[in-house]
Image (spheres, grey):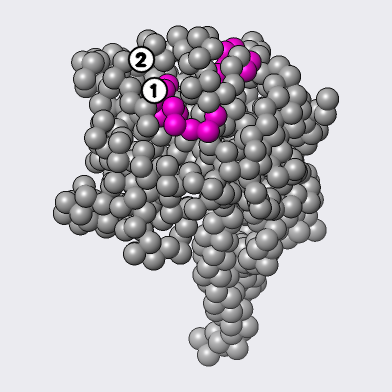
Amino acid sequence: MEQHRSAARKPKAPSSKGTLTRRTLFYFWVATRKHLGLFLGLLASTIGFVGLLTYGNPYVMSLIVDRVSAGPVAADEVFPVFGPYIVALVLINAVGQACSKLQDLTAWKLQIAANYDLATMAFDALSNQSMSFHSSRFGGTLVSETSKFMNAYTLLMNTITFPFLPVICSVAFTCTLLLPVVPVYVAVLMVLLVVYASVSYLMYKRILHLNEKAAAAQNRLSGELSDAVTNILAVKTCGREDHERALFDAANRDVVARDSKRMMSSIARGIITACITVVIMSVVTVFIAGGNAWFGISAGTLVMMFTYTYTLTNQFNFINTGLQRLNQVFGDASGMTAVLDEPRLVADVPGALPLKVERGQIDFQDIGFSYADGGVATVVFDDLDLHIPAGQRVGLVGASGAGKTTLTKLLLRLADIQQGRILVDGQSVADVTQQSLRRNIAYVPQEAMLFHRSIAENIAYGKPDATRDEIREAARLANADGFIEDLPQGFDTLVGERGIKLSGGQRQRVAIARAILADAPILVLDEATSALDSESEAAVQDALRTLMRGRTSIVVAHRLSTVASLDRIIVLRDGVVVEDGTHEELLAREGEYAALWGRQTGAFLE
């Protein structure tokens, strides 16, 4: 039997914190290199801004001090003597300010452009993941992780711009300008700064995992809130507000505890590095005091030494803040980074072609499928074979857990089989693009899936270019036009999140109207009329019979009246076909279907 090939395409997901950090940087670089000109402009403008305003000004001022120290200058000689220095200061400040504004411009443009790419990257990863992926995660947590991922990039760029790039510039300019004049001083200063940077980095590594845990706690808090709000009706009708508040409070307290631990570690790091800063300033004070007497250093150079060292130590003080930001960056981004690295359980094969459906024949050949929950594999199908001729209307019935809905999801490739093949008109669904497959199958699930958009937009979701008349006709066929016209804004009425403003039956009829309008050659109805009252069900059944005419149709149902008039009924038990035939044939056999039919009362038969 042919094994499904998707497993060979799965990348290995990261497992260590260090790997997550590297992968975060990789994704950020992917977004940055698309706008490399802006990034290089940001670096150049930052270097120019720091070099000119922070180091150019003190350097020229040291020259002025040395000239003043050399002897008095007559009033009429001020401009001839100091004119070049004045011009130099004006140019330095003008160009430095221009670099400052260019830095602002490139930083903003880069962050806006890169955040667009990162948002698209996250959306593509989430929208192309399997239903198994989404069923085990909070939607609110994924939204929170996406937002934090984008904000982390902005914070990283701000941290590079200040303080890390200015610190590197400060070290480079200090060495360049002071090393030829006072090499001993520069050597001592560099040793102390290396000690400072090493201590900061070691403590940063110790705190990194605390930031990741704090970010994870924040995501859990968002998930608890999202879960409670999404299911607020169940919370209220069961009187469980106190219970949900307790769950939220526990998650909230975990956030406080982890944030507090992170805060104390950061403060301890700050105290240690502050002590090193005091040592550095003590050394510079000694050199300033005895520099002229011991080494013959001029007054201007002493001023330059103090200014550069003071600036440098201040910049290094901000390293603590920068490292704390980096902790936050990688902690906040870790959740979405793990999602981006998550193996895609269902993916198109390289060079996948679009599905072309001419007849609509479906074949399940030697299907083997199991799913893992909590690390335990549960077998659903083992060597299942099923042939559905083109245009045939087939009902799937059986007890809950028999595999009815799972079979339709495998057809739609919402999950991938482990063995065998599923063919549509002889084309393996594993070899065609997922979008083309699903656009050829109109699917109506048991729970209607509506967007917080207008009713017209929801009906036209499978056919975005549909006219208003086509939308109205689909609603009429689904017996939905009556209640829609009674709404204040009619077809322009917003339905609320997940269609909460509509009743269950109304939502289902909108979903059926969407399937009618999609006009796909294959139709899958998974308990599509379960939320309808008897009168609406009868009307919608007529619409569905019209819709199914000439189409290959698979109807999953518990109410056997839904499938009694179909061409063929298949009874599943534990993933195995136990009966196959028409309604009359199965009743005559007095087997499992007949027993199910006998237990249901009030059913009608066309």
Residue 427 position (above or below residue 408): below
Quarter holding the N terminus is top right
The residue pinned by badge 2 equals 600
Residue 168 appears in the rendering: no
Residue 9 appears at what percent x and percent y? 78, 36
**SS for tag 1?**
loop
Q: Which kind of residue does numbered mark 1 sit on?
A: Arg
Residue 549 appears at what percent x and percent y? 49, 46
Q: Earlier in the sequence, mark 1 or mark 2?
A: 1
Residue 215 position (above or below residue 472): above
Mark 1–mark 2 contact, CB under 8 Å? yes
Q: At 46% from the left edge and 60% from the top edge, which residue is drawn?
A: 464
Quarter holding the C terminus is top left
* Label 2 CA crowd tier, 10 Å (few <14, some 14–19, many 20+): few
Q: Viewer-proximal residue, 554 or 237?
A: 554
Q: Viewer-proximal residue, 220 or 44?
A: 220
Q: Which mark is residue 388?
A: none
In the rendered image, residue 562 lying in the magenta stretch gets the answer yes
* Label 1 CA crowd tier, 10 Å (few <14, some 14–19, many 20+): some
Q: Viewer-proximal residue, 282 or 18?
A: 18
Magenta-drawn segment: 558-577
The residue pinned by badge 1 equals 559
